[in-house]
Image (cartoon, grey):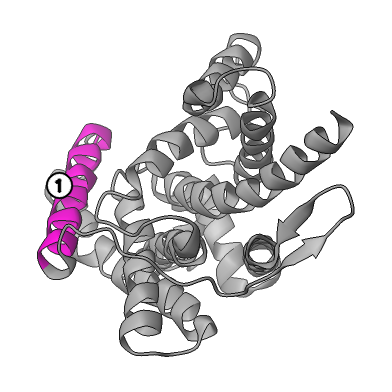
Amino acid sequence: MLESIVEFLILGIVLGGIYALFSTGLSLIFGVLDVINVAHGEFFAIGGYLAFAAIVLLHLPAAAGVAAGAVGAFLLGLAVYPLLIAPLKRRFGRQPQGSLFLVLTLGLSTFLQSSLLAIGGGDYLRVPPYLRGIVDLGFTGISNQRLLILAVAVLALVALFLFLYGHRQGMAIRAVAMNPDAAQAVGVNLTMIFTLAIALGTGLAGLAGALIAPLFNVYPAVGFTFTVKAFAITILGGLGNLAGALLASFLVAIVETMSVLVIPSEWQNVIAFVIMIAVLLVRPQGLLGRAPAG
């Protein structure tokens, strides 16, 4: 029993790295722009498709495929704010736009998913493992592929937080998230920061999609389940709180994998929402979110 617990704990940590990449990007976009990006899962799928194209079709190294997924999703993300969100903001000014952005990103989700279907077809595509073999831990083994996923996810998340806390543009992103009007008053270019924040978020989603492609089939709607779960994780961690999203990602992933020991696997996908509801009943602001003033 102890060996099974350790084995599932390791699997949960690896899954948590993927959840963290995906959910942190979603939380970053919401924290900076106050926009719920329903199309986040499609950028995850784009990362998988680009990895497939680079590795299977072009016969490039695995590292090139992963980079293609991340960079491609980042570059596409650069177009989202200036082409879609900014015109809507100019049109409606300071009127509440939350529901409009929700519909807008839902339309973007449909467009991207239909485009992937038209370009790549509806077949399930397979990406070969980036690394083969396993690491023997004595009582169990863990594949090199999963260790690679965890290592790259951790490096990417460390790089993100170093950028946000150590780079001028990263600190500008944090300033805009806290008070956009004050940030603009001291010379921060809001358009550039909004554009960069979305691109960083979508780039993380693309990286997650490319990393996990060998473990899942790649198809247009592959990101849907991750998107729904990421909403629960983002709310659980505290809307817009990156550290909260990071903590909630690993918490949900570990509980999900460990739950297989005591409940049927068919119930695994509801775990995130059960945890979210339980925590929100005690802390409505989420794990690390701030309570409303007053």
Query: Is residue 60 in view?
Result: yes
Q: Quadrant of the N terminus?
A: top right
- The count of marks equals 1
Secondary structure of the residue carrying numbered label 1: helix
State the residue at coordinates (60%, 15%). Answer: 294
Left or right of 268, for residue 163: right
Q: Nearer the viewer, residue 214 or 100?
A: 214
Is residue 264 rendered magenta in the image?
no
x and y percentages locating residue 16 in the rendered image: 63, 46
Q: Which residues are magenta?
A: 96-118
x and y percentages locating residue 127 in the rendered image: 41, 70
Q: Which residue is mark 1?
A: 107
x and y percentages locating residue 187 in the rendered image: 48, 68
What secondary structure is the stretch in magenta mostly built from? helix
State the residue at coordinates (66%, 69%). Answer: 159
Query: Is residue 292 in view?
Result: no
State the residue at coordinates (47%, 24%). Answer: 266
Seen as rendered, the residue at the extreme top is: 281
In the displayed structure, would residue 132 be above or below residue 209?
below
In the displayed structure, would residue 292 be above or below residue 181?
above
Quadrant hosting residue 84: bottom left
In the displayed structure, would residue 21 be above or below residue 195?
above
State the residue at coordinates (27%, 49%). Answer: 221
Kind of residue at disc 1: Gly
In the displayed structure, would residue 1 be above or below residue 16?
above
Quadrant hosting residue 144: bottom right
